[in-house]
Every structure is written in structure tokens, then in C-alpha cells.
Amino acid sequence: MWRGRPLRAPTPASGGRTLRPAMVRPLRFEHYRWLGDKRSMVVHDLDAAGEVCRIDELVRSEQFASYGPDLLAEARNRGYHPCRHCTR
């Protein structure tokens, strides 16, 4: 469930792009960027995750992993693949 604010209209300061608010992070992960799903071995970028990533459902299932250091490279070293919806 998306708990952020609705999308804002483009402004001159944004260069005409539609700005998206930062996702409300899970309580214990406010200082982490990458969160892995142990069931599918996919890592999500919490800065860019959207509805399709279902982060709330992942946290409820308790089948997730965080990494130290909090880097995509560390997640890849552990066998996780980037989510195609929230990573570029």
C-alpha cells in the first residue's frame, strides 16, 4: 500500500519533470536503501520502489534481507538480482 503523497505537478525548478515523493520506508529500515526478497532473490531500491514492488507485503512476510555495506554491489555478491521496476 502506497502511503506517500500524490505526485506533484511539474515545476520550472524541476525542469518540467513530474516529481515523485520518497517512499515511506519500513520502520527498521529508514537508514537503508537496498532490501532483498529472500523468496525470489530480488533486491529492491527503497528510494525508487513503487506499488508494483509490494514492499509492505515483503516486510509483513519477514522474508527480507538487508546488506552491510548497504550497496547494490553487496546484494549482487550475495546472489540477488536488481528489481527491474525500481532499479536502472
Image (cartoon, rainbow, N blue to C red):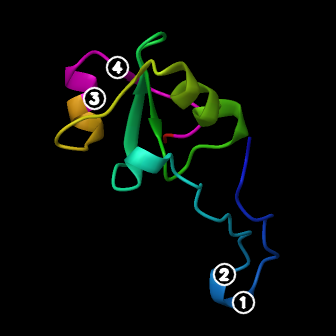
Label annotation for residue 15: 2
User: How far, Cα to Cα, is label 2 from label 3?
Assistant: 33 Å
- Distance from disc 1 to disc 2, alpha carbons, whole Å, reads 5 Å
Pointer 1: what residue?
Answer: 12
**Crowding near the residue tagged with mark 4, few <14, some 14–19, many ≥20 C-alpha atoms within 10 Å:** some
On the rendered structure, is 9 left or right of 85? right
Q: Measuring 57% from the left and 26% from the top, which residue is drawn there?
A: 60
Q: Nearer the viewer, residue 71 or 55?
A: 55
Q: Residues within 10 Å of mark 1 (few under 14, many from 20)?
A: few
- In space, the residues marked 3 and 4 are separated at their CA atoms by 5 Å
Q: Amino acid at mark 2?
A: Gly
Q: Dot 3 surroundings within 10 Å: few (below 14), some, or many (20 or more)?
A: many
Question: Which residue is at a point 70% across and 32% down the rendered structure image?
Answer: 52
**Disc sitting over residue 75 in the figure:** 3
Q: Which residues are magenta?
A: 75-86
Residue 43 to residue 5: above or below: above
Which residue does the numbered mark 4 point to in the structure image? 80
Q: Earlier in the sequence, mark 4 or mark 1?
A: 1
Q: Position of residue 6 (x, y in %)?
A: 80, 64
Q: CA distance from mark 1 to mark 3?
A: 37 Å
- As rendered, which of 44 and 65 lies closer to the eye? 65
- Give the structural element (helix, strand or loop) at label 1: helix
Apparent side of residue 16 relative to residue 59 in the rendered image (left or right): right
Q: Are marks 3 and 4 in contact (CB under 8 Å)?
A: yes
Residue 53 sits above or below residue 19 on the image = above
- Dots 1, 2 in contact, CB < 8 A: yes
**CA separation, marks 2 and 4?**
34 Å
Residue that protrudes farthest toward the top in the picture: 39
Q: Which of the two marks, 1 or 3, is nearer to us in this view?
A: 3
